Amino acid sequence: MLVTGIASVFSLSLQAIANVSVSKNKLVAINLAQEGIELVRQIRDTNEIKGIAWDTGFFPAGCGVGNETDASGLTIPNLTPYSPGRYIKYPDDKGLYSYDSGSDTIFKRQIIVEKPACGGSWPRGDVDNDNEVHIVSTVFWNEKSVAKSVKLEEVLYNWK
């Protein structure tokens, strides 16, 4: 009876520890997905400051095609075509997530930016407006041999 009780407590403890790891990975993924949206917002804001078209640099791989970027420096981020085999690294020399330095993590991030004219899954139906883009930031990872993902979406506007 005592052995059964100890085994039950031990089993519950192991399950709780495993759940903490799952929760931590999902939290990191959510934050990386949000960072993807914020980096696109930073590109828009910098374009306005420079006096160039607000959506310059949003479509390096084509409209509605996956991209990636990181906040590894103090320079303005650039979207580059998404590479499914490329993992986000951690930590870089500043203690941040990056594609340039650090050790591979379990996370990959894809950022899709599309205009209404691109088609695709426009969140508010058919909109014919060149002053907004739909951002979809998705982070992928595998956990215990199960593919996981977190997807965040936002409509970003040309506020000028």
Image: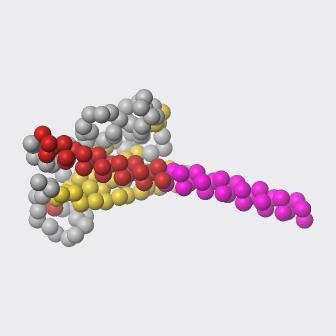
The one nearer the camera, 51 or 140, is: 51
Q: Is residue 118 visible?
A: no
The answer to which image quadrant residue 132 occupies is: bottom left
The answer to which image quadrant residue 151 occupies is: bottom left
* Total numbered labels: 0
Q: x, y percentage for residue 147?
A: 48, 54
The residue drawn where x is 51% and y is 50% is: 25
- Relative vertical location of residue 45 with respect to residue 98 in this rendering, above or below: below
Residue 76 located left or right of residue 47: right
The one nearer the camera, 137 or 92, is: 92
The residue drawn where x is 36% and y is 52% is: 34
Q: x, y percentage for residue 160?
A: 11, 54
**Secondary structure, magenta segment, majority class:** helix
Q: Is residue 49 visible?
A: yes
- Relative vertical location of residue 95 with respect to residue 63 in this rendering, above or below: above
Residue 94 located left or right of residue 132: right
The residue drawn where x is 15% and y is 48% is: 55
- Relative vertical location of residue 89 with respect to residue 110 in this rendering, above or below: above
Q: x, y percentage for residue 30?
A: 42, 54
Residue extending farthest to the right is 1
Residue range highlighted in magenta: 1-26
Residue extending farthest to the bottom is 125
The quarter in which the N terminus is drawn is bottom right
The residue drawn where x is 67% and y is 57% is: 15
Residue 125 located left or right of residue 100: left
